[in-house]
Image (cartoon, grey):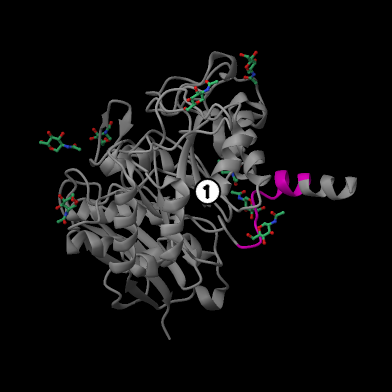
Amino acid sequence: MILFLLGLRILKVVNALVSPDGTGRLPAMGWNSWNEYACDISEDVFVRVADLMVHLGLKDLGYQYVNIDDCWSVKGATRDNVTQRIIPDPVKFPGGIRHVAEEMHARGLKLGIYGDAALGTQTCGGYPGSLGYEEVDAAAWSEWKVDYLKYDNCNIPQEWVDVPYMYPDNGGRPDGPVPPGYDWSTSNSSARYNRMRDALLAQNRTIQYSLCIWGHANVAAWGNATGHSWRMYSDIYPAWAGARQGSQALMPILNQAAFYWNVSGFWGRNDWDMLEVGNGNLTLEENRSHFALWAALKSPLIIGTKLDAISPEILAVLKAEEIIAFNQDPVYGAGAMPYRWDGVGNDTHPADYWAGSSSRGVHVFLLNTEEVERDMELVFGEIPGLQEQQPSVRRGPYLVHDMWTGKDIGVFSDSAVLRVKRHDTAAVRITTAN
Ligand SMILES: *[C@@H]1O[C@H](CO)[C@@H](O)[C@H](O)[C@H]1NC(C)=O
Ligand SMILES: *[C@@H]1O[C@H](CO)[C@@H](O)[C@H](O)[C@H]1NC(C)=O
Ligand SMILES: *[C@@H]1O[C@H](CO)[C@@H](O)[C@H](O)[C@H]1NC(C)=O
Ligand SMILES: *[C@@H]1O[C@H](CO)[C@@H](O)[C@H](O)[C@H]1NC(C)=O
Ligand SMILES: *[C@@H]1O[C@H](CO)[C@@H](O)[C@H](O)[C@H]1NC(C)=O
Ligand SMILES: *[C@@H]1O[C@H](CO)[C@@H](O)[C@H](O)[C@H]1NC(C)=O
Ligand SMILES: *[C@@H]1O[C@H](CO)[C@@H](O)[C@H](O)[C@H]1NC(C)=O
Ligand SMILES: *[C@@H]1O[C@H](CO)[C@@H](O)[C@H](O)[C@H]1NC(C)=O
């Protein structure tokens, strides 16, 4: 028995959250209420979204989680005075959360919920947090048949702050004071998130665990032993470049991602935040770049737009089958890496040539960060996945295939030139032509 328990513990720490049913092995796909509905949520919103996910064909492409974000409970520090559980808002969720979960399951979908690793009082929106109540809350979510938890990081009490700290989302504020070789897995942040991990693992239910920790305490170094994905940076907002009230637009996030490309793998993913495809002032090309690059990074693909009256163009972006296939590849766990920088690598001109391998070939994503249409060059000799192959495979000529249209572009020997619109991303698959 002791050996058995010891074995479990080691499995847990060394092997990430590996579950027999495969939950969390690939980046999560689904929909979340925050970007479009904020606190204006109700059971009706989620049931309607679930119907649309089925009806629009999103479920068939792998989008399966329907995630409730903040504001689902009775506000304040209120808990049930007998069970100590958080109380679902009886107006927004008259049938309770379990009823919503059952509605999702009846449609072949899954339900996600939201919590915060703060003391009893405060999620980001001022609803009860779970610090100190991990077991009570995990047991409730499990009993309610919840399948996914997004666990946020607002309102950390003073006695839990990190002394060596790292806040990449905080306007370039330097880290400090970090001793050389510091082990971030011993941080207070890691301890807060591990408490919920242990509470979830103690349930007789597999719950995907998404850490919304904004890159704090160098989560890239320990997230894989704690959850299935971990937010790496500030909240996203739907604009191409710039920052607004602590949120970052697409290009600054991509620039940050370019320096952490090698952290994601099976069972554990950098999360560059939920999709804004379809929101704000993005152009069609910007909507496309956002989707292609988040997929290339192997970030979770969580839709954040209204599905009612969604435009055919936006739906087509979210349903780009070959782009999704790269994100969900069952054989290659790593995301794409930046391999050539025509831009300088800053918050308006981040890395623009990205490459990654999948079971279907080598893929290149060419992002035009310029304000005008331009030619971008595929030089086969400099593309990482192609170079690493056996000489017989490495040799051209190569077939270049357009992942957006599903059509072949042509056969080329040493290089190919692609015309890319302002702020668009060309996505191609390269295989040996024979
Ligand atoms: C995370 O852990 C899993 C399971 O042990 C492993 O396959 C994967 O490579 C790890 N990811 C990273 C980025 O180390
Ligand atoms: C417990 O909560 C119920 C219903 O919310 C309330 O009627 C009751 O007075 C509370 N009991 C205590 C001891 O606070
Ligand atoms: C954790 O928080 C406690 C209480 O504020 C503090 O004394 C300790 O140094 C912190 N530990 C780390 C590793 O940051
Ligand atoms: C755990 O869940 C499974 C499937 O839902 C069920 O068959 C089993 O009885 C449960 N075990 C315990 C200990 O509750
Ligand atoms: C990722 O790359 C950085 C910098 O090159 C390196 O320090 C780190 O060990 C790498 N991490 C992994 C998981 O390979
Ligand atoms: C990209 O998304 C935004 C928000 O829905 C929309 O206004 C814009 O028209 C989209 N691009 C196109 C051409 O569909
Ligand atoms: C979209 O553009 C309008 C008008 O320029 C501006 O007021 C608004 O803040 C922009 N929205 C976003 C999300 O950037
Ligand atoms: C990034 O670099 C380019 C080229 O040097 C420059 O034009 C642009 O203003 C820079 N952007 C930022 C956010 O510094």
- 234 part of magenta stretch: no
Give the residue drawn at x 51%, y 71%. Answer: 359
Q: Report if residue 250 is visible in the image.
A: no
How many other residues sit within 10 Å of disc 1, few (<14), some (14-19) or many (≥20)? Answer: some
Give the residue drawn at x 25%, y 33%. Answer: 242
Image position, residue 199 (x, y; %): 65, 39
322 relative to 404 in the view: left or right: right
Image position, residue 3 (x, y; %): 89, 48
Give the residue drawn at x 18%, y 55%. Answer: 284
Q: Report if residue 40 is visible in the image.
A: yes
- Which is nearer the eye, 21 or 434? 21
* Residue type at tag 1: Trp
Q: How many marks?
A: 1
Q: Is residue 294 above or below residue 41?
A: below
Q: Is residue 359 above or below residue 200?
A: below
Question: Can you say which quadrant of the picture contains the C terminus?
Answer: bottom left
Q: Which residues are magenta?
A: 9-21
- Which is nearer the eye, 328 or 209? 209
- For label 1, the residue is 144
Q: Secondary structure at mark 1?
A: loop
Residue 192, image quadrant? top right
- 16 part of magenta stretch: yes
Image position, residue 378 (x, y; %): 34, 63
Image position, residue 91 (x, y; %): 33, 38
Residue 424, image quadrant? bottom left
